[in-house]
Amino acid sequence: MNILILRNEAEIGQVLGDLFCALAREKKNAVLGLATGSTPLPSYRRMISRYKAGDVSFKDVITFNLDEYCGLPADHKNSYRTFMRQELFEQIDILHKNTHFLDGNTNDERAESERFRRLIENAGGIDLQLLGIGRNGHIGFNEPSDAFTQEAYRTALTESTIAANSVYFDDCPMPRYAMTMGVGSILRAKRIVLVATGEAKAEAVKAMLEGEVTPGCPASALQNHPNTTVYLDPAAAALLSV
Ligand code: PGA
């Protein structure tokens, strides 16, 4: 894995936003793997400003999001569909039909997982996957467990994740389950960029980069991916030994 320590989250957002724009310009039907949470926002803001400046178009781009809560209507203000619409899709020229999400309300988890796998495969695979990392080392909603997960599945969220994300749920209880791409499906991306900023992520970053590869820290699986770059601010890098 390559590790880059930049000055702050704004600088990381600029670099990564530009990377996504470059891919959209260079490759027709580029396939982007997108993430939610606070970490990707500076990258999305950069993509929006480059679009508004007329530098780039996303109309041929195809996207897949990592995960979605179970038990929320798709148009709920806290669904990840809504998040993506508000924070990125409505502000660029991407076509709605080219944006893909797991259905958190499916009655058939296996069929939904297979549908998503095939959609990604038919699009040619994910060219560039954006990831954050949870304080417990999760990627997507792959929480620490006894075995690495493979295809998309329905997972129970851990107390750490519930504590981190419940701040966004001011008028209803936070869901306890989510559909997420598995670690195996994430690792099929041709290129991965993972961002971690702030001291709350420092321990997870150390475990991911310097610990053993173990499903106890799902992000450690990235050590086995051939083209991953980790972007850190100084606070998230603070516990690294090198
Ligand atoms: P955050 O979440 O960007 O809101 O910190 C990242 C994650 O949980 O993967």
Image: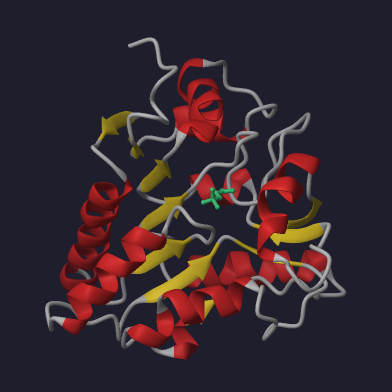
Left or right: 73 with respect to 230?
right
| Camera sees residue 152 | no
* Residue at 61 percent of width and 36 percent of height: 135
* Residue at 81 percent of width and 75 percent of height: 106
Instruction: Please identify the quarter of the rendering in which residue 147 is found.
Output: top right
Position of 175 relative to 211 (above/below): below
Foreground residue among 227 and 49 = 49
Quick one: quadrant of the C terminus?
top left
Residue 3 percent coordinates (x, y): 31, 29
Quick one: quadrant of the N terminus?
top left
Q: How many marks?
A: 0
Residue 185 percent coordinates (x, y): 57, 51
Foreground residue among 79 and 198 = 198
Residue 8 percent coordinates (x, y): 29, 42
Left or right: 86 with respect to 66?
left
Position of 230 relative to 172 (above/below): above
* Residue at 79 percent of width and 43 percent of height: 158
Position of 118 relative to 226 (above/below): below
